[in-house]
Amino acid sequence: MKYCILLLACFTMTIAKAQIPTPIHLWPQNRLIDTANGHKLVEHDVTKPTDNKQGGKYVIRLADISDPTITVYTPKKPNGTAVVVCPGGGYAILAMDLEGTEICTWLNSIGVTAVLLKYRVPAPGGKSRYELPLQDAQRALGLVRYNAAKWNIKPDHIGILGFSAGGHLTATLSNNNTQRAYPQVDAADSTSCKPNFAVLIYPAYLKGSTDPTKLAPEVQVTSNTPPTFIVQTEDDPIDVQNALSYYSELKNFKVPTEIHLYAKGGHGYGMRTVEGDLAGYPKLLQNWLLNTKF
């Protein structure tokens, strides 16, 4: 009897482990930079008991990331669409649950394969805040497309979704994908890293530093920018103009675009908002993801 119980416990533990996706390292170790601002990077959660909660729960704030990964979350019934998920955090930390794992769970619930990107933050001295994250996003998108058949993904249905700084990273990849920003690693880097679609949720850093109606140099829209879905609130302290300027340029270049602008909601809500009109945006995003022909 004890043997049977022990065997059952071992079997249960094995199943539980099998259900947890294994992170995939993006880069060979000799390509990584593990220092920033003069100190050694040791990945850790910087959340404190005094931090504000979102939706009644704390947020995992992962800092000092030097070894970026992707983690593939596969739904029970994949529909062939995949989304690379970019958490936000001001390019200083990553909100790994609020804007990461929770979004992956939601995407799986609608049949979409989710690929959680843990990109490098903060920037080492002498590099822009988005330089290494863009390399990580290019590498991640290419790897997903390269492994599309193995991961039950349609290679022409691979998008990218980001929150706040992750929204900026999403826009940056959307407009910087014809040439890799790093030396080729392997055959995956010969695969296109252009997203088939993009989702920006309360994006930051998109507007120009001198003229807020213009875009930052790294997010210059062209007719080659992929179809885009945007969610934004009027009372966002990061400034609604980031989304509005980007949307305006998308329309100027006739890029298929859908924007949902809400009066209230602030910033950094992920998908934890359960009250008001803003709580309905995941359903609108679901309809767009499942019904738009990319």
Image (cartoon, helix red, strand yellow):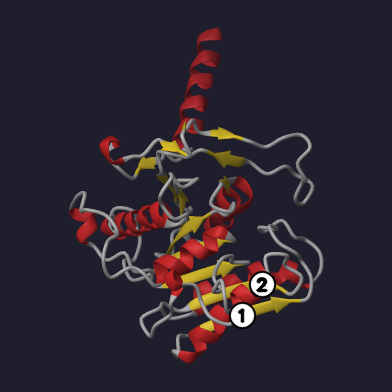
**Label 2, residues with CA under 10 Å away: few <14, some 14-19, many ≥20:** many
- Identify which residue, 265 or 281, lies in the foreground: 265
**Image marks 1 and 2: residues in contact by CB distance under 8 Å:** yes
Residue with the mark numbered 2: 232
Tell me which numbered mark, 1 or 2, is placed earlier along the sequence: 2
Viewport quadrant of the C terminus: bottom left
Helix, strand or loop under label 2: strand
Residue 258: tell me if it is visible.
no
* Image: 46 above or below 283: above
What is the x, y in percent for residue 44? 55, 32
Q: Which is more foreground, mark 1 or mark 2?
A: 1
* Image: 276 above or below 87: below
What is the x, y in percent for residue 253? 44, 89
Residue with the mark numbered 1: 244
The amino acid type found where label 1 is placed reads Leu
Q: Is residue 144 left or right of residue 17?
A: left
Q: Is residue 217 left or right of residue 26?
A: right
What is the x, y in percent for residue 58? 72, 42
* Image: 29 above or below 265: above
Splitting the image into 4 quarters, where does residue 140 fall?
bottom left
What is the x, y in percent for residue 174? 41, 70
Helix, strand or loop under label 1: helix
